[in-house]
Amino acid sequence: MVADDEPLARQRIEDLLAREKDVDIATASTGGEAIERIRDGSPDIVFLDVQMPDRNGLEVVKEVGAENMPATVFVTAFSKFALNAFDVAAVDYLVKPFDDDRFAEALQRARKRAVERRREAHSKYVDRIAVESRGQTRVVPVAAIDYITASGPYAELHAAGKVFAVRERMQTLEEQLDPELFFRVHRSAIVKLKRIDALLHRPGGDYAVRLKDGTELDLSRARREELQQRLGIK
């Protein structure tokens, strides 16, 4: 994301980023808009102008929370803000005007930080779930799970055509699973995103998801819009 209230300055960074094959660009022209896009869009990297209407760049970081910020490169015409920028854990600091090589250096640093943060985030989630049955404990790899459904005090793990019952709350399982891979479509169901084949609109205004194996699961109305966004459906 590029956040700058000056159109020409914003366009300069956009043009440099457009040379990168694996970059999608979002923009913001005020501090408030930057906060909204960071919270809703979860960009990996943000080029953040220090002086903007509404809130300046340092105030954006304060409101979002430094620990919640993407890899951040501050951009400004005033080098006096550099110390404050690094105080809030900025990856780098670009002083306008900057040349292409200096920008490339900042982008490389930001990419490295973004990758590190992704690795840290993924390490929080489990990669296997222990299931006790008939006096033995089996280990179900999370990678093999297609979906999970609630069944009374148990949750049923549906993996590779088999069903494993585990005495665990759905909320606890949801917190243990990587949200990049799984989505809770209903209070009684968690689904691996890549297993979803279609969204269904049932009579009466209800919704459901159909998986690639033909399984249909209820989709909460409150979660439909977020799921559409995750799947890239407008």
Image (cartoon, rainbow, N blue to C red):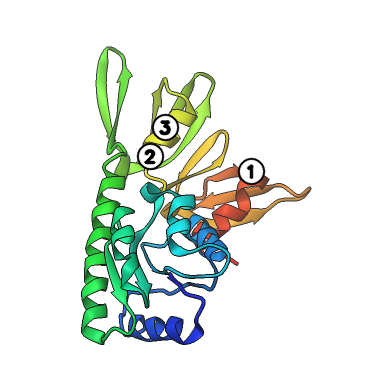
Where does the image place residue 106, in percent across and percent down from the top left? 25, 72
Where does the image place residue 188, in percent across and percent down from the top left? 56, 33
Name the image quarter holding the C terminus: bottom right
User: Which residue position is annotated with label 3?
Assistant: 173
Query: Is disc 1 surrounded by few (<14), some (14 to 19) or many (20+) residues within 10 Å?
Result: some
Q: Are marks 2 and 3 in contact (CB under 8 Å)?
A: yes
Residue at the image point whose x is 52% and y is 25% from the top: 151
In the rendered structure, which amino acid carries the disc numbered 3?
Answer: Leu
Which residue is nearer to you in this view: 16 or 227? 16
- In the rendered structure, find residue 38 and report the number of the disc placed on it: none
Q: CA distance from mark 1 to mark 2?
A: 19 Å
Residue at the image point whose x is 55% and y is 51% from the top: 210
Q: Earlier in the sequence, mark 1 or mark 2?
A: 2
Where does the image place residue 183, in percent across and percent down from the top left? 48, 46
User: Which residue position is annotated with label 1?
Assistant: 220
Whether residue 94 is situated above or below residue 182 in the rendered picture: below
Which residue is nearer to you in this view: 55 or 137? 55
For the question of whether residue 212 can be seen, the reply is no
For the question of whether residue 26 can be seen, the reply is yes
Whether residue 50 is situated above or below residue 141 in the rendered picture: below
The residue positioned farthest toward the front in the image shown: 80
Q: CA distance from mark 2 to mark 3?
A: 6 Å
The residue positioned farthest toward the top in the image shown: 135
Residue at the image point whose x is 33% and y is 58% from the top: 84
Q: Quadrant of residue 78?
A: bottom left
Q: Are marks 3 and 1 in contact (CB under 8 Å)?
A: no
Q: CA distance from mark 3 to mark 1?
A: 18 Å
In the rendered structure, which amino acid carries the disc numbered 1?
Answer: Ser
Residue at the image point whose x is 41% and y is 62% from the top: 43
Q: Are marks 1 and 2 in contact (CB under 8 Å)?
A: no
User: Which residue position is annotated with label 2?
Assistant: 177
